[in-house]
Image (cartoon, rainbow, N blue to C red):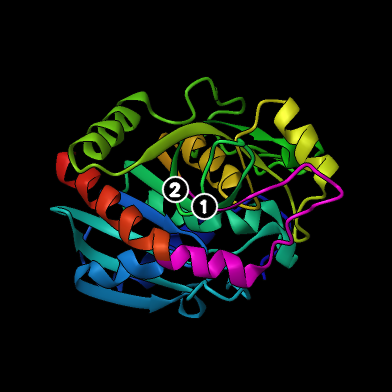
Amino acid sequence: MTTDVLPIREQLEEARTAVYRRTSQVPSVGLILGSGLGLLAEQVQDAVTIPYEEIPHFPTSTVEGHSGQLVLGTLGKQAVVVMQGRAHFYEGYSMHTITFPVRVMRALGIRRLIVTNAAGGLAPHFVPSELMLIRDHINLVGMGGHHPLIGPNDSKLGPRFPDMAEAYDPELCGIARQVAERDRIPLREGVYVYLAGPSFETPHEVHFLRMIGADAVGMSTVPEVIVARHMGARVLGISGITNVHSTDPLHPHETTHAEVLEAGRVIAPRMAQLIRGVLEQL
């Protein structure tokens, strides 16, 4: 585990060099695959697979459903680098550490990042196994003082105060909508709220999150999006809705990680179809 300091360019260069010892391909698109969504990595052609443990300063995931390997190759006519699993803040890593892989992918050459996650549905009309296009996010963890850009800023990596008015790229969102309509993939849209976890939400917490305008809740994604935007990458975010939360304390719905992984098996083929369609349109 790396220390709780902003990654320096020397660390990025060490990680980048380790990857390029294994491949000469320069990716243009990065993908981060959430819990139970690793299917897409298996579809990468001419794949070079590198375990996270073999990349300097890279965090490793301890969570079931996160394979923990970097896959480089071709997908949907694009040169891609795929994170098959991610590290989370609740695993004990710092914000700088869990977002280090995004900085490495940017150093490898990506200009666009597609980030996915397994999320709990907050909107009452959502149905488990649906996909949600992320229009915007609410960073409650960051508002509480845990932000991936806290600390000294390296202006050669990005600006001190990056704008988040369009954290999720309008053009990429438009392409996702077109692909979903063309391929008849049901696609909701909404606001994703980021919580630290690892416990799932109480009914009254769910009620609060709905009140502030959130449509889905999860324990990842937002720090990665912030760092990608800090470094100038354009972002597309898609959530797989694994369950829909209840606000009724007398009839709560018990959420388990096993349920999340099982829903991911249904979501994964739809997610893969949508992302491949987006990649083919870039």
Q: Tell me if residue 61 comes above or below residue 30 in the rendering.
A: below
Name the residue carrying label 1: 128
Residue reaching furthest to the left: 77
Question: Which quadrant would the N terminus be assigned to in this image?
Answer: bottom right
Of 16 and 268, nearer the camera is 268
> Mark 2 is on which residue type?
Glu
| Image quarter of the C terminus | top left
Question: Could you classify mark 2 by the number of other residues whose Cα lies within 10 Å: few (under 14), some (14-19), or many (20 or more)?
Answer: many
Q: Which residues are magenta?
A: 239-265
> Does residue 35 lie above or below 29 as drawn?
below
Q: Position of residue 242 (x, y in %)?
A: 54, 56
Asked whether 113 or 207 is in front, the reply is 207
**Residue 22 shows in the view:** no
| Residue type at numbered disc 1 | Pro
Task: Give the image location of residue 162, x and y in percent.
Answer: 56, 26
Q: Is residue 118 above or below residue 181?
A: below
Q: Is residue 273 above or below residue 91?
A: above
- The local secondary structure at tag 2 comes to loop
Tell me, for residue 76, which label it has, or none: none
Place of residue 5 in the rendered image (x, y in percent of width and height, measured from the top left): 70, 53
At horizontal 53% and vertical 69% (from top left) the residue drawn is 261
Q: Residue at x 55, y 25 (%)?
A: 164
